[in-house]
Image (tube, rainbow, N blue to C red):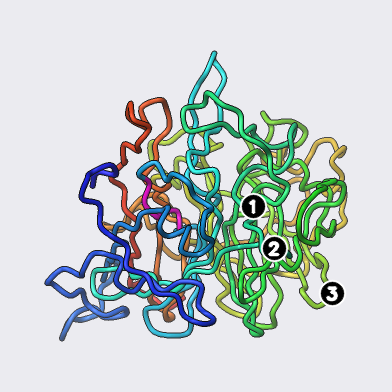
Amino acid sequence: MSSHAADRRRVNRSLAAGLPLALLAAVTAAGPAAAAPAGSDGPGAAPARSAHVTRTATLGDIPLGAFSNALLPGTVADDRGVDLGGIGSDLYPAGREGEFWTVTDRGPNGQIKVGGTKRRTFPVPGFDPAIVRIRVSGETVRVLEAIPLTTSSGKPVTGLPDQAGRDEAPYSYDASTPLSYDPDGLDTEGIVRAADGTFWLVDEYGPSLVHVSAHGKVLTRYVPKGLGLTGAGYPVVEALPSVLLHRKINRGFEGLAQLPGGDLVMALQSPLSLPDADAGNTSRTTRLLRFSPRERAVTAEYAYRFDPVGVVDPGEDDTSELKISSVVAVGRDRLLVEERTDKAARLQLVRLERSADILGDRWDDATASPSLEQFDDPAAAGVPVLAKRLVVDLGAVKGVPGKIEGVALVDDRTLALINDNDFGMTDGPGAFDARGRLVDSGVETTVTYVRLPHRV
């Protein structure tokens, strides 16, 4: 698909009371061959003995400017030929078959090296992250509803970095012009919907846990103690352990699960940079945190140990490529945890045992030496580490795309997966042509159903 072709598809949209956006006819029509329903192995087929793809659906082309301006008019002056993407940050069942809640990340962004230093670019700085409800229909992903994230006064939050000196400095699409920081900015990732209709999101900048109304207004942003974020247009509460201030840049919270009782579990994408970046880059120990919305506090913390990077992604030897992108509740105290690189992913099953709780222990002290992240074998050093069991190696399942960031449980043997296509962007000076229009990567947003050989 060419992002700057003259005949880009027109977005048909309708605004209705209570619905920020309906884009029912904005995407490509489904192809002629319908895929097997979710959870089906095909008519008369015996259950397969290995995990396999049963269905794949693709999001069509929706110009990003039209999408954003239909939600909050005037927010995007020029989308530079970028289509809606990035909605694969997470996937949460919306209550009807084939329907899911998703959330965009901070918007189109990339990196360009200038004078030997990488600069973070934001080609569409007015982009406002949004909660998006989708439906898988045949071979097409359709957008049913979109809810923009706003401040208390209704202003867009944007996806720009928050704090100079802590977050990456933002630049224009060609890395030539500095952009302003935005204390309201959110790099949204995981999403769940609470019983009262509000949403909970996680953010990589703070890292933060963000409570959002049913209409997209940020109600409270919970951040680490000592962050000192000022100037935000919504309530900011320092309620998370201060050790989280040492999150790796662009690797804050990414996974979020909601347990049956309403508690939340947040996953740090990568190990903390303790005592320094080198230790974080070589560590295989990250953290999960349990948060009680009723108490508005973290109530437990767990050490989670990645498998070696060459096990998760054969051929990869850079440990810093390991990430947690999705966590899914599968019972009162059990979680599916996605370990991944950009090319491969594996789902592990863990149980949140009380005996593994390290909240308030010495590992929450940033001056501890050695740090939790420095242990080659934390369990051998007496640190309780969550036991895990492999459920499925998605890298070995034919038809599963790369960079899976969202996982949902459709039934006890069927997964729905969504990838992050990065809005079709690539890094480097070749990401845009001489006219400043996107040179699209061709990577599409897809929802993929995977049938497991055994129940979770």
> Residue 214 appears at what percent x and percent y?
62, 76
User: Would you call the spot at circle 2 few (<14 residues within 10 Å), some (14-19), or many (20 or more)?
Assistant: many
Q: Between marks 2 and 3, how big is the CA–CA gap?
A: 15 Å
Badge 1 marks a residue whose secondary structure is loop
Residue found farthest to the top? 115
Magenta-highlighted residues: 82-87
- Identify which residue is drawn at 67% across, 68% down: 217
Residue at 66 percent across and 44 percent down: it is 271
Callout 2–callout 1 Cβ contact below 8 Å = yes
Between 208 and 232, the one nearer to me in the picture:
232
Look at mark 1 in the image and give the residue it sits on: 186
The answer to whether residue 400 is magenta is no
Can I make out residue 302 in this image?
Answer: yes
Whole-percent x, y for residue 26 in the image: 31, 66
Q: Which residue is mark 3?
A: 295
What residue type is disc 3 on?
A: Glu
Amino acid on which the number 1 mark rests in the picture: Leu
Q: Nearer the viewer, mark 3 or mark 1?
A: 1
Residue that carries the numbered disc 2 in the rendered image: 210
* Residue 286 in the image, given as x and y percentages of width and height: 66, 49
User: Residue drawn at (16%, 68%), measured in percent from left and top?
Assistant: 31
Of the two numbered discs 3 and 1 on the same chain, state the one appearing first in sequence: 1
Q: Earlier in the sequence, mark 2 or mark 1?
A: 1
Q: Please report contact status of discs 3 and 1: CB closer than 8 Å, yes or no.
A: no
Vertical order, 372 against 131 (above or below): above
Q: Amino acid at mark 2?
A: Val
